[in-house]
Amino acid sequence: MSTGTASSPSASTSKEFNPFEAMAERFNVAADHLGLDQGLRDVLRTPDRELTVAIPIKMDDGTMRVFTGYRVQHNFSRGPCKGGIRFAPDVNLDEVRALAAWMTWKCAVVDLPFGGGKGGVICNPAELSQGELERITRRYTSGILDILGPDRDVPAPDVNTNEQTMAWLMDTYSMHVRRTTTAVVTGKPIALGGSKGRTEATGRGVMITAREALKKLGMRQEGTTVVVQGSGNVGGIGARLMQAQGHRILSISDMFGAIHNENGLDMPDVLAYLKANKKLNGYPKAKAITPAQQLEIPCDVLVPAATENQITSANAAKVRAKVIVEGANGPTTAEADKILEKNGILVVPDILANAGGVTVSYFEWVQDRAGFFWTEEEVNTRLEQIMVDSFKSVDAMATQHKTSMRIGAYIVAVGRVAAVYKLRGTYA
Protein backbone atom coordinates (compact mmCIF):
# COMPACT_ATOMS: atom_id res chain seq x y z
CA MET A 1 0.00 0.00 0.00
CA SER A 2 1.09 3.54 -0.56
CA THR A 3 1.87 5.87 2.29
CA GLY A 4 2.76 8.95 0.35
CA THR A 5 6.36 7.92 -0.26
CA ALA A 6 7.82 8.51 -3.68
CA SER A 7 6.32 5.99 -6.10
CA SER A 8 9.08 6.42 -8.68
CA PRO A 9 12.31 7.22 -6.87
CA SER A 10 14.97 9.02 -8.87
CA ALA A 11 18.27 7.40 -9.72
CA SER A 12 19.90 9.23 -6.81
CA THR A 13 17.52 7.65 -4.31
CA SER A 14 16.88 4.26 -5.94
CA LYS A 15 19.49 2.58 -3.74
CA GLU A 16 17.48 3.57 -0.68
CA PHE A 17 14.49 1.63 -1.97
CA ASN A 18 16.44 -1.50 -2.94
CA PRO A 19 15.66 -4.05 -0.17
CA PHE A 20 18.84 -6.06 -0.72
CA GLU A 21 20.97 -2.90 -0.40
CA ALA A 22 19.10 -2.02 2.81
CA MET A 23 19.77 -5.47 4.27
CA ALA A 24 23.43 -5.32 3.22
CA GLU A 25 23.96 -1.91 4.84
CA ARG A 26 22.67 -3.12 8.22
CA PHE A 27 24.66 -6.36 7.85
CA ASN A 28 27.88 -4.42 7.25
CA VAL A 29 27.44 -2.33 10.39
CA ALA A 30 26.84 -5.48 12.46
CA ALA A 31 29.83 -7.20 10.85
CA ASP A 32 32.00 -4.22 11.82
CA HIS A 33 30.92 -4.56 15.45
CA LEU A 34 31.66 -8.30 15.33
CA GLY A 35 35.03 -7.80 13.64
CA LEU A 36 34.26 -10.26 10.83
CA ASP A 37 36.88 -10.66 8.12
CA GLN A 38 36.02 -9.89 4.49
CA GLY A 39 35.88 -13.52 3.43
CA LEU A 40 33.30 -14.48 6.06
CA ARG A 41 31.28 -11.34 5.23
CA ASP A 42 31.15 -12.40 1.58
CA VAL A 43 30.00 -15.89 2.54
CA LEU A 44 27.24 -14.65 4.86
CA ARG A 45 25.97 -12.05 2.37
CA THR A 46 25.80 -14.41 -0.59
CA PRO A 47 22.70 -16.63 -1.08
CA ASP A 48 23.55 -20.35 -1.09
CA ARG A 49 21.15 -21.06 -3.96
CA GLU A 50 18.86 -19.15 -6.32
CA LEU A 51 16.36 -20.84 -8.63
CA THR A 52 14.27 -19.17 -11.36
CA VAL A 53 11.53 -21.24 -12.99
CA ALA A 54 9.14 -20.74 -15.89
CA ILE A 55 5.53 -21.55 -15.04
CA PRO A 56 3.46 -22.28 -18.17
CA ILE A 57 -0.25 -22.28 -17.34
CA LYS A 58 -3.40 -22.89 -19.37
CA MET A 59 -5.75 -20.07 -18.43
CA ASP A 60 -9.49 -20.49 -17.99
CA ASP A 61 -10.12 -19.07 -21.48
CA GLY A 62 -7.89 -21.72 -23.05
CA THR A 63 -4.89 -19.46 -23.74
CA MET A 64 -1.38 -20.19 -22.47
CA ARG A 65 0.62 -17.81 -20.28
CA VAL A 66 4.09 -18.19 -18.84
CA PHE A 67 4.68 -16.81 -15.35
CA THR A 68 8.06 -16.47 -13.62
CA GLY A 69 8.78 -17.87 -10.18
CA TYR A 70 11.75 -17.58 -7.81
CA ARG A 71 13.04 -19.43 -4.78
CA VAL A 72 16.12 -18.10 -2.99
CA GLN A 73 17.78 -20.13 -0.25
CA HIS A 74 20.03 -17.73 1.57
CA ASN A 75 21.66 -19.92 4.18
CA PHE A 76 21.73 -23.62 5.16
CA SER A 77 24.24 -23.54 8.01
CA ARG A 78 21.83 -23.64 10.97
CA GLY A 79 19.24 -25.93 9.38
CA PRO A 80 16.61 -26.10 6.60
CA CYS A 81 15.71 -22.86 4.87
CA LYS A 82 12.48 -21.25 6.05
CA GLY A 83 10.45 -18.49 4.48
CA GLY A 84 7.28 -17.49 2.70
CA ILE A 85 6.09 -17.49 -0.89
CA ARG A 86 4.42 -14.36 -2.25
CA PHE A 87 2.30 -13.85 -5.35
CA ALA A 88 2.47 -10.26 -6.59
CA PRO A 89 2.98 -8.34 -9.86
CA ASP A 90 6.03 -6.49 -8.51
CA VAL A 91 7.98 -9.53 -7.26
CA ASN A 92 11.62 -9.33 -8.36
CA LEU A 93 14.82 -11.23 -7.62
CA ASP A 94 16.43 -8.47 -5.53
CA GLU A 95 13.37 -8.35 -3.29
CA VAL A 96 13.31 -12.13 -2.88
CA ARG A 97 17.07 -12.17 -2.12
CA ALA A 98 16.62 -9.53 0.57
CA LEU A 99 13.65 -11.27 2.12
CA ALA A 100 15.54 -14.58 2.17
CA ALA A 101 18.46 -12.92 3.95
CA TRP A 102 16.11 -11.24 6.42
CA MET A 103 14.68 -14.69 7.17
CA THR A 104 18.17 -15.97 7.98
CA TRP A 105 18.67 -13.16 10.48
CA LYS A 106 15.11 -13.41 11.80
CA CYS A 107 15.44 -17.14 12.53
CA ALA A 108 18.82 -16.55 14.15
CA VAL A 109 17.68 -13.64 16.32
CA VAL A 110 15.02 -15.87 17.94
CA ASP A 111 17.47 -18.81 17.85
CA LEU A 112 15.49 -21.20 15.64
CA PRO A 113 17.35 -24.06 13.85
CA PHE A 114 16.56 -22.67 10.40
CA GLY A 115 18.26 -20.70 7.67
CA GLY A 116 16.46 -18.18 5.48
CA GLY A 117 14.56 -18.74 2.27
CA LYS A 118 11.99 -16.84 0.25
CA GLY A 119 9.95 -17.39 -2.88
CA GLY A 120 7.73 -15.45 -5.23
CA VAL A 121 5.72 -15.65 -8.42
CA ILE A 122 5.20 -12.63 -10.66
CA CYS A 123 1.42 -12.49 -11.06
CA ASN A 124 -1.60 -10.47 -9.99
CA PRO A 125 -3.86 -12.75 -7.92
CA ALA A 126 -6.73 -10.24 -8.18
CA GLU A 127 -6.90 -10.99 -11.91
CA LEU A 128 -6.74 -14.79 -11.55
CA SER A 129 -9.42 -17.35 -10.80
CA GLN A 130 -9.11 -19.89 -8.00
CA GLY A 131 -8.38 -22.58 -10.58
CA GLU A 132 -5.63 -20.51 -12.20
CA LEU A 133 -4.05 -19.82 -8.80
CA GLU A 134 -4.09 -23.53 -8.00
CA ARG A 135 -2.45 -24.43 -11.31
CA ILE A 136 0.24 -21.74 -10.81
CA THR A 137 0.93 -23.01 -7.27
CA ARG A 138 1.18 -26.64 -8.33
CA ARG A 139 3.39 -25.98 -11.38
CA TYR A 140 5.62 -23.62 -9.36
CA THR A 141 5.92 -26.31 -6.66
CA SER A 142 6.89 -28.95 -9.21
CA GLY A 143 9.46 -26.55 -10.66
CA ILE A 144 11.24 -26.08 -7.32
CA LEU A 145 10.51 -29.56 -5.97
CA ASP A 146 14.12 -30.73 -6.00
CA ILE A 147 15.16 -28.12 -3.46
CA LEU A 148 12.13 -28.50 -1.14
CA GLY A 149 11.66 -30.86 1.79
CA PRO A 150 11.28 -30.89 5.60
CA ASP A 151 15.07 -31.11 5.93
CA ARG A 152 15.85 -28.78 2.99
CA ASP A 153 13.43 -25.89 2.61
CA VAL A 154 10.06 -25.31 4.30
CA PRO A 155 7.87 -22.59 2.69
CA ALA A 156 5.02 -20.67 4.32
CA PRO A 157 2.37 -18.12 3.30
CA ASP A 158 3.33 -14.53 2.53
CA VAL A 159 1.78 -11.67 0.53
CA ASN A 160 -1.32 -12.89 -1.40
CA THR A 161 -0.84 -16.53 -0.39
CA ASN A 162 -2.64 -18.35 2.43
CA GLU A 163 -3.31 -21.70 4.05
CA GLN A 164 -5.08 -22.94 0.90
CA THR A 165 -1.96 -22.16 -1.14
CA MET A 166 0.09 -24.16 1.36
CA ALA A 167 -2.38 -27.07 1.15
CA TRP A 168 -1.91 -27.19 -2.65
CA LEU A 169 1.88 -27.00 -2.24
CA MET A 170 1.90 -29.75 0.38
CA ASP A 171 -0.33 -31.99 -1.74
CA THR A 172 1.79 -31.46 -4.88
CA TYR A 173 4.99 -32.29 -3.01
CA SER A 174 3.38 -35.31 -1.33
CA MET A 175 2.13 -36.70 -4.64
CA HIS A 176 5.62 -36.49 -6.13
CA VAL A 177 7.37 -38.17 -3.20
CA ARG A 178 4.56 -40.73 -2.85
CA ARG A 179 3.84 -40.07 0.82
CA THR A 180 1.96 -37.45 2.78
CA THR A 181 4.59 -34.99 4.02
CA THR A 182 2.90 -32.37 6.17
CA ALA A 183 6.19 -30.90 7.45
CA VAL A 184 7.17 -29.61 3.99
CA VAL A 185 5.21 -26.38 4.59
CA THR A 186 3.85 -24.38 7.52
CA GLY A 187 0.85 -22.10 7.74
CA LYS A 188 -1.39 -24.99 6.65
CA PRO A 189 -5.02 -25.60 7.66
CA ILE A 190 -5.20 -27.28 11.07
CA ALA A 191 -6.88 -30.31 9.45
CA LEU A 192 -3.67 -30.86 7.42
CA GLY A 193 -1.25 -30.52 10.32
CA GLY A 194 -1.35 -26.79 10.93
CA SER A 195 -0.64 -25.39 14.38
CA LYS A 196 -3.12 -23.76 16.69
CA GLY A 197 -2.16 -20.13 17.26
CA ARG A 198 -0.36 -19.79 13.90
CA THR A 199 -2.80 -17.27 12.38
CA GLU A 200 -2.42 -14.91 15.33
CA ALA A 201 1.30 -15.54 15.87
CA THR A 202 2.87 -12.58 14.04
CA GLY A 203 0.36 -10.11 15.47
CA ARG A 204 0.87 -11.60 18.92
CA GLY A 205 4.63 -11.23 18.55
CA VAL A 206 4.14 -7.57 17.64
CA MET A 207 1.99 -7.09 20.74
CA ILE A 208 4.59 -8.77 22.98
CA THR A 209 7.55 -6.77 21.64
CA ALA A 210 5.55 -3.51 21.87
CA ARG A 211 4.83 -4.31 25.50
CA GLU A 212 8.52 -5.02 26.19
CA ALA A 213 9.56 -1.78 24.44
CA LEU A 214 7.15 0.23 26.59
CA LYS A 215 8.58 -1.44 29.70
CA LYS A 216 12.08 -0.50 28.54
CA LEU A 217 11.05 3.15 28.27
CA GLY A 218 9.17 3.09 31.60
CA MET A 219 5.84 3.82 29.90
CA ARG A 220 2.45 2.59 31.14
CA GLN A 221 0.56 0.00 29.11
CA GLU A 222 -2.91 1.31 29.92
CA GLY A 223 -4.03 4.08 27.57
CA THR A 224 -0.97 3.87 25.31
CA THR A 225 -1.90 5.32 21.90
CA VAL A 226 -1.19 3.18 18.84
CA VAL A 227 -1.31 3.73 15.06
CA VAL A 228 -1.29 0.60 12.88
CA GLN A 229 -0.51 0.54 9.17
CA GLY A 230 -2.09 -2.58 7.72
CA SER A 231 -5.12 -4.61 8.79
CA GLY A 232 -4.34 -8.23 7.89
CA ASN A 233 -3.05 -11.04 10.08
CA VAL A 234 -0.26 -8.80 11.37
CA GLY A 235 -1.83 -5.35 11.63
CA GLY A 236 -5.44 -6.29 12.28
CA ILE A 237 -4.78 -9.08 14.77
CA GLY A 238 -1.94 -7.12 16.36
CA ALA A 239 -4.25 -4.12 16.85
CA ARG A 240 -6.97 -6.29 18.37
CA LEU A 241 -4.51 -7.93 20.79
CA MET A 242 -2.96 -4.57 21.71
CA GLN A 243 -6.38 -3.11 22.45
CA ALA A 244 -7.04 -6.09 24.71
CA GLN A 245 -3.85 -5.08 26.60
CA GLY A 246 -5.39 -1.66 27.28
CA HIS A 247 -3.87 0.28 24.38
CA ARG A 248 -5.94 2.86 22.50
CA ILE A 249 -5.86 2.24 18.74
CA LEU A 250 -6.12 5.65 17.05
CA SER A 251 -5.83 4.60 13.42
CA ILE A 252 -5.62 1.57 11.14
CA SER A 253 -5.36 1.25 7.37
CA ASP A 254 -5.75 -1.11 4.44
CA MET A 255 -4.61 -0.96 0.81
CA PHE A 256 -7.35 1.57 -0.01
CA GLY A 257 -6.84 4.14 2.76
CA ALA A 258 -6.85 4.78 6.50
CA ILE A 259 -9.34 5.61 9.26
CA HIS A 260 -8.77 7.66 12.43
CA ASN A 261 -10.61 8.19 15.71
CA GLU A 262 -8.84 10.23 18.38
CA ASN A 263 -10.94 8.55 21.10
CA GLY A 264 -9.88 5.09 19.95
CA LEU A 265 -11.24 2.44 17.61
CA ASP A 266 -13.24 -0.60 18.69
CA MET A 267 -11.06 -3.17 16.94
CA PRO A 268 -13.48 -6.14 16.95
CA ASP A 269 -16.08 -3.83 15.40
CA VAL A 270 -13.59 -2.47 12.84
CA LEU A 271 -12.45 -5.96 11.84
CA ALA A 272 -16.05 -7.17 11.53
CA TYR A 273 -16.80 -4.20 9.23
CA LEU A 274 -13.67 -4.96 7.20
CA LYS A 275 -14.63 -8.62 6.83
CA ALA A 276 -18.14 -7.72 5.68
CA ASN A 277 -17.19 -4.87 3.33
CA LYS A 278 -13.70 -5.96 2.15
CA LYS A 279 -12.35 -2.46 2.85
CA LEU A 280 -12.23 0.10 5.68
CA ASN A 281 -13.56 2.86 3.46
CA GLY A 282 -16.94 4.03 4.75
CA TYR A 283 -16.48 2.83 8.33
CA PRO A 284 -19.00 5.05 10.16
CA LYS A 285 -17.27 5.47 13.52
CA ALA A 286 -14.05 7.10 12.27
CA LYS A 287 -12.94 9.68 9.74
CA ALA A 288 -11.09 8.80 6.56
CA ILE A 289 -7.52 10.05 6.22
CA THR A 290 -4.75 9.46 3.71
CA PRO A 291 -2.01 6.89 4.33
CA ALA A 292 0.54 9.73 4.41
CA GLN A 293 -1.44 11.52 7.15
CA GLN A 294 -1.65 8.32 9.17
CA LEU A 295 2.13 8.08 9.62
CA GLU A 296 2.19 11.64 10.99
CA ILE A 297 -0.38 11.11 13.78
CA PRO A 298 1.12 11.84 17.23
CA CYS A 299 1.14 8.52 19.13
CA ASP A 300 3.10 6.41 21.54
CA VAL A 301 3.51 3.39 19.24
CA LEU A 302 3.53 3.21 15.44
CA VAL A 303 3.20 -0.26 13.89
CA PRO A 304 4.02 -0.36 10.16
CA ALA A 305 2.56 -3.76 9.26
CA ALA A 306 2.04 -3.50 5.50
CA THR A 307 4.94 -3.67 3.03
CA GLU A 308 8.53 -2.54 2.54
CA ASN A 309 9.85 1.04 2.22
CA GLN A 310 7.01 2.87 3.98
CA ILE A 311 9.13 5.08 6.26
CA THR A 312 11.81 6.72 4.15
CA SER A 313 14.10 9.75 4.07
CA ALA A 314 11.15 11.65 2.58
CA ASN A 315 8.78 11.21 5.53
CA ALA A 316 10.79 9.95 8.54
CA ALA A 317 11.13 13.45 10.01
CA LYS A 318 7.32 13.73 10.11
CA VAL A 319 6.85 10.60 12.24
CA ARG A 320 5.68 11.60 15.74
CA ALA A 321 5.74 8.29 17.57
CA LYS A 322 7.86 7.39 20.61
CA VAL A 323 8.26 3.75 19.52
CA ILE A 324 8.07 2.04 16.12
CA VAL A 325 7.37 -1.70 16.16
CA GLU A 326 7.95 -3.13 12.68
CA GLY A 327 5.24 -5.66 11.91
CA ALA A 328 6.17 -5.73 8.20
CA ASN A 329 9.43 -6.83 6.61
CA GLY A 330 11.67 -3.88 5.75
CA PRO A 331 9.17 -1.05 6.32
CA THR A 332 11.93 1.42 7.23
CA THR A 333 14.79 2.30 4.90
CA ALA A 334 18.36 2.61 6.13
CA GLU A 335 18.30 6.37 5.42
CA ALA A 336 15.11 6.74 7.46
CA ASP A 337 16.73 4.85 10.36
CA LYS A 338 19.31 7.60 10.73
CA ILE A 339 16.60 10.26 10.98
CA LEU A 340 14.51 8.28 13.47
CA GLU A 341 17.53 7.59 15.68
CA LYS A 342 18.50 11.27 15.62
CA ASN A 343 14.95 12.14 16.70
CA GLY A 344 15.10 9.72 19.63
CA ILE A 345 12.51 7.23 18.34
CA LEU A 346 13.03 3.66 19.52
CA VAL A 347 12.67 1.21 16.62
CA VAL A 348 11.97 -2.45 17.40
CA PRO A 349 13.25 -3.98 14.14
CA ASP A 350 11.36 -6.34 11.86
CA ILE A 351 13.69 -9.30 12.37
CA LEU A 352 12.65 -9.26 16.04
CA ALA A 353 9.18 -7.67 16.10
CA ASN A 354 7.54 -9.85 13.45
CA ALA A 355 9.38 -13.07 14.32
CA GLY A 356 6.31 -14.46 16.08
CA GLY A 357 5.11 -15.91 12.78
CA VAL A 358 8.25 -17.90 12.00
CA THR A 359 8.50 -18.98 15.65
CA VAL A 360 5.08 -20.64 15.56
CA SER A 361 5.89 -21.95 12.07
CA TYR A 362 8.82 -23.69 13.77
CA PHE A 363 6.41 -25.06 16.36
CA GLU A 364 4.20 -26.36 13.52
CA TRP A 365 7.18 -28.04 11.84
CA VAL A 366 8.17 -29.69 15.14
CA GLN A 367 4.60 -30.90 15.75
CA ASP A 368 4.28 -32.30 12.21
CA ARG A 369 7.56 -34.19 12.50
CA ALA A 370 6.61 -35.58 15.91
CA GLY A 371 3.00 -36.30 15.00
CA PHE A 372 1.97 -34.78 18.32
CA PHE A 373 0.13 -31.47 18.60
CA TRP A 374 0.02 -28.82 21.30
CA THR A 375 -2.83 -26.81 22.75
CA GLU A 376 -3.14 -23.16 21.80
CA GLU A 377 -2.21 -22.22 25.36
CA GLU A 378 1.03 -24.21 25.06
CA VAL A 379 1.82 -22.54 21.72
CA ASN A 380 1.20 -19.05 23.09
CA THR A 381 3.18 -19.70 26.28
CA ARG A 382 6.21 -20.93 24.33
CA LEU A 383 5.93 -18.02 21.89
CA GLU A 384 5.82 -15.55 24.78
CA GLN A 385 8.98 -17.01 26.31
CA ILE A 386 10.95 -16.90 23.05
CA MET A 387 9.86 -13.36 22.14
CA VAL A 388 10.61 -11.94 25.60
CA ASP A 389 14.00 -13.70 25.84
CA SER A 390 14.90 -12.52 22.32
CA PHE A 391 13.92 -8.92 23.11
CA LYS A 392 16.16 -8.98 26.17
CA SER A 393 19.08 -10.45 24.20
CA VAL A 394 18.78 -7.79 21.50
CA ASP A 395 18.39 -4.98 24.04
CA ALA A 396 21.47 -6.19 25.93
CA MET A 397 23.51 -6.38 22.73
CA ALA A 398 22.41 -2.89 21.66
CA THR A 399 23.38 -1.54 25.09
CA GLN A 400 26.74 -3.33 25.03
CA HIS A 401 27.64 -1.92 21.61
CA LYS A 402 25.97 1.47 22.20
CA THR A 403 23.87 1.16 19.08
CA SER A 404 20.23 0.96 17.95
CA MET A 405 18.06 -2.08 18.59
CA ARG A 406 18.12 -2.84 14.87
CA ILE A 407 21.89 -3.10 14.81
CA GLY A 408 21.75 -4.96 18.11
CA ALA A 409 19.43 -7.50 16.51
CA TYR A 410 21.73 -7.86 13.50
CA ILE A 411 24.74 -8.34 15.79
CA VAL A 412 22.92 -11.13 17.65
CA ALA A 413 21.75 -12.80 14.43
CA VAL A 414 24.89 -12.43 12.32
CA GLY A 415 27.02 -13.48 15.26
CA ARG A 416 25.06 -16.71 15.69
CA VAL A 417 25.28 -17.62 12.01
CA ALA A 418 28.97 -16.68 11.83
CA ALA A 419 29.71 -18.85 14.89
CA VAL A 420 28.16 -21.88 13.18
CA TYR A 421 30.19 -21.25 10.00
CA LYS A 422 33.40 -21.09 12.01
CA LEU A 423 32.57 -24.32 13.85
CA ARG A 424 31.57 -26.23 10.72
CA GLY A 425 34.39 -24.93 8.54
CA THR A 426 34.31 -24.76 4.75
CA TYR A 427 33.84 -27.95 2.75
CA ALA A 428 36.07 -28.08 -0.33
Image (tube, rainbow, N blue to C red):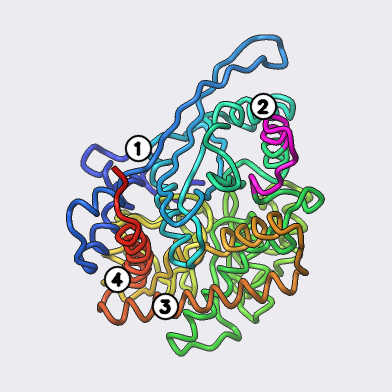
Residue 341 is labelled as 4
- Give the alpha-carbon distance from disc 4 to disc 2, as whole Å: 43 Å
Residue 8 is labelled as 1
Which one is earlier in the sequence, the residue at label 2 or at label 1?
1
Secondary structure beneath label 1: loop
Q: Give the number of the mark in front: 4 or 3.
A: 3
Q: Position of residue 328 (x, y in %)?
A: 50, 56
- Give the alpha-carbon distance from disc 1 to disc 4, as whole Å: 26 Å
| Nearer to us in this view, 90 or 406 | 406
Callout 4 crowding tier (Cα within 10 Å): few <14, some 14–19, many ≥20: few
- Give the alpha-carbon distance from disc 4 to disc 3, as whole Å: 20 Å
Which one is earlier in the sequence, the residue at label 4 or at label 2?
2
- Give the alpha-carbon distance from disc 2 to disc 1, as whole Å: 27 Å
Which one is earlier in the sequence, the residue at label 1 or at label 4?
1
Q: Position of residue 392 (x, y in %)?
A: 44, 80
Please, what is the three-letter code of the amino acid marked with disc 2?
Leu
Residue 393 is labelled as 3
- Give the alpha-carbon distance from disc 3 to disc 1, as whole Å: 38 Å
Q: Which residue is mark 2?
A: 128
Secondary structure beneath label 3: helix
Find residue 85 and report its image quarter.
Answer: top right
| Nearer to us in this view, 188 or 123 | 188
